[in-house]
Image (cartoon, rainbow, N blue to C red):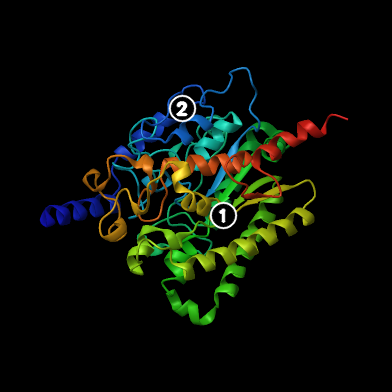
Amino acid sequence: MALNLVVSLVSILISSIFPQPRAFQHHHELFGLSPNSANFISSTSSPTSSTSIPLTPSISAPPLAPALFVIGDSSVDCGTNNFLSTLARADRLPYGRDFDTHRPTGRFCNGRIPVDYLALRLGLPFVPSYLGQSGSVEDMIHGVNYASAGAGVIFSSGSELGLHISFTQQIQQFTDTYQQFVLSMGEHGANDLISNSVFYISIGINDYIHYYLRNVSNVQNLFLPWSFNHFIASTIKLQIKNLYTVNVRKVVVMGLAPIGCAPHYLWEYRSENGECIEEINDMVREFNFVMRYMIEELGEELPDSKIIFCDLLEGSMDIIKNHRRYGFNVTADACCGLGEYGGWIMCISSEMACSDASNHIWWDQFHPTEAVNAILADNIWNGLHTNMCYPMNLEEMVVSKEKGSNP
């Protein structure tokens, strides 16, 4: 058993470092997934997740936004890292086993990630990864996902895992996309598309997982948690200002998740009875406080902008504390992983996974299950289960223009 596990781990590490051609196949299958073709949900989703999102928006109803652009890390990576030499890959089962295609796509989840649900809410197809589409304007007209697992605000965050597309690089990739739009449809057409589109930013957690908490470059002696939090939040704020210069107006900024409750840290800190590691969550809580304040400042500084902050810790802790109400009975253990809480070794084979992820909060060491993602997407959209977005939710952002046009 132990020998088989070692052999399996070694083979997977080798294939992760040297990408396989099959990583390209699954992504092209997803390009045809429209809101109307994605008419079924994973068989393991909880009742909450399977009933709250309309999977087949009316064909006649126009989308609420022309496109959805995603910038971030593994929380929203839909396949970017399939094309990179890195250990941070989710291109093999059991990842994706409960997704619409029942195949791995590069999403760090058993099924859908939050932006999949939000794309459907907006009346859009699933958004392809930047490296997983042809580069034509037709492929990008409804949005692009630039997110890369392991990426952080700090360029070197997560670099021990291999290659990734950093936050700054993703911003540059979007700028390149914008230039393609200008060449294709003219400056006015490109600006109109971008200004009405939704931008979703979910990044920063790797700056803690792979940088601050590991004390890389002796960072903990150089920055107290408050100073580090302020530095990360200020950098995100600056990049949002840069996006504003290319006519980005509607932005959703996600706060950080309560990684102090993640199976990896429960294992590493030897948690008793699955109790969250509060010293880690306190840092996250502090960052979210600073980020929310800076988003409020941006709203005042940037005319005609609609920038909202969604407190992922707040929404996630509501699920953890009220897990029975949401249908979860496993709150600390990962569905897929080895060691105590499943937090020692990452999810590398189907044999390591539980049979039913729908009653688990955590899918692997760091990432939630599809069922949790569905609930969080509900909250981002309209605060269905708990309010976690300020000063408005996404639905209010995209429909307020229509309401405001009526005297």
Up the image or down, 394 lies above or below 3; here it is: above
Spatial separation of the CA atoms under disc 2 and disc 1: 32 Å
**Corner quadrant of residue 181:** top right
* Labelled pair 2, 1 in contact (Cβ < 8 Å): no
Q: Quick one: SS at disc 2?
A: loop
Q: Nearer the viewer, residue 209 or 237?
A: 209
Within 10 Å of disc 2 (Cα), the crowding (few <14, some 14-19, many 20+) is some
On the rendered structure, is 32 left or right of 25? right
On the rendered structure, is 352 left or right of 29? left
Question: Which residue is the extreme one toward the right?
Answer: 407
**Residue 310, position as x, y percentages in the image:** 61, 51
Q: Tell me the residue at 48%/46% (across/down).
A: 76
Look at label 2 and name its amino acid.
Answer: Leu
Q: Quick one: SS at disc 1?
A: helix
Q: Nearer the viewer, residue 28 or 362?
A: 362
**Residue 240, position as x, y percentages in the image:** 66, 54
Q: Quadrant of the C terminus?
A: top right
Up the image or down, 345 lies above or below 75; here it is: below
Count of residue discs = 2
Look at label 1 and name its amino acid.
Answer: Glu
Q: Which label is found at residue 314?
A: 1
Q: Which residue is mark 2?
A: 33
Up the image or down, 346 lies above or below 93; here it is: below
On the rendered structure, is 8 left or right of 382? left
Question: Which residue is the extreme one toward the bottom?
Answer: 221
Look at discs 2 and 1 and give the one toward the viewer.
1
Q: Nearer the viewer, residue 357 or 303?
A: 357
